[in-house]
């Protein structure tokens, strides 16, 4: 893990309206932590579902998908056929899937979301937008914040799954997991 402070402690993200800074901070933090968690993670473990929980691969695809879908609704657009196809494929295992490919896809989605945030007019944040096929009324603010909070929720779930699948991946330089380090220091 890096010694740099979390993004919200670093000040404003350039080009992002002040009221949308928390969304940008959360998206950038998600990107950073995802890379930290999965650094050196084996492709063979990407689709493992310990105790039936969602796989690391699912979480990576879902995080990117949710961000993309929420930003599409925020722009008052319907989902495309391609987006529906990706949504359907989120839970499907990819036979030769690679962690690096899914990380690249998430990076592109987050980078595009940050660009779209920068183009968002703060004066419209309380305007109504419609979510999904049921056209549930929500606010522009709600969609943008939900993209970040939902992605962070899956980041946490992905971290637990990754630890369950490959606990040795999370050993520190002393050969102890974080839990064993705490027990040793108690």
Image: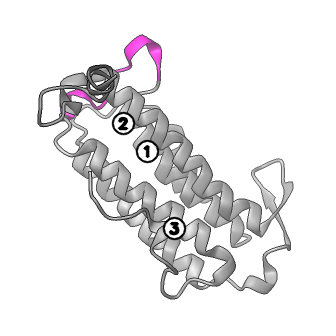
Give me the disc on residue 57. Answer: 2
Specify the quadrant of the image occupied by residue 110: bottom left
Q: Which one is in front, 101 or 12? A: 12
Marks 2,1: beta carbons within 8 A:
yes
Horizontal and vertical percent position of residue 66: 57, 51
Q: Is residue 82 magenta?
A: no
- In this rendering, which labeled residue sits more in front, label 3 or label 1? 3
Q: Which one is in front, 42 or 82? A: 42
Measured Cα–Cα span from mark 2 to mark 1: 6 Å
**Label 3: element kind:** helix
Q: Earlier in the sequence, mark 3 or mark 1?
A: 3
Residue positioned 23% across, 32% down in the render = 170
Horizontal and vertical percent position of residue 43: 20, 35
Range covered by the magenta-colored residues: 43-53
Q: Which one is in front, 83 or 3? A: 3
Left or right of 182, for residue 45: left
Residue positioned 22% across, 42% down in the render = 98
The residue at which mark 1 appears reads as 61
**Label 1: element kind:** helix
Residue positioned 49% across, 80% down in the render = 13
């Amino acid at each position: 893990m890096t010694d740099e402070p979390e993004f919200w402690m670093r000040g404003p993200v350039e080009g992002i309206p002040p009221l949308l800074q928390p969304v940008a901070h959360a998206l950038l933090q998600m990107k950073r932590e995802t890379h930290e968690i999965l650094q050196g993670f084996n492709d063979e473990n990407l689709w493992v579902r310990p105790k039936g929980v969602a796989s690391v691969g699912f979480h990576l695809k879902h995080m990117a998908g949710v961000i993309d879908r929420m930003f599409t609704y925020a722009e008052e657009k319907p989902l495309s056929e391609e987006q529906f196809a990706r949504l359907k494929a989120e839970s499907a295992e990819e036979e030769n899937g690679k962690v690096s490919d899914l990380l690249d896809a998430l990076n592109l989605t987050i980078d595009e979301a940050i660009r779209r945030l920068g183009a968002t007019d703060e004066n419209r944040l309380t305007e109504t937008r419609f979510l999904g096929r049921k056209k549930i009324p929500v606010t522009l603010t709600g969609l943008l914040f939900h993209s970040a909070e939902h992605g962070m929720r899956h980041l946490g779930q992905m971290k637990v799954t990754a630890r369950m699948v490959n606990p040795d991946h999370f050993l520190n330089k002393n050969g102890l997991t974080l839990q064993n380090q705490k027990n040793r220091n108690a």
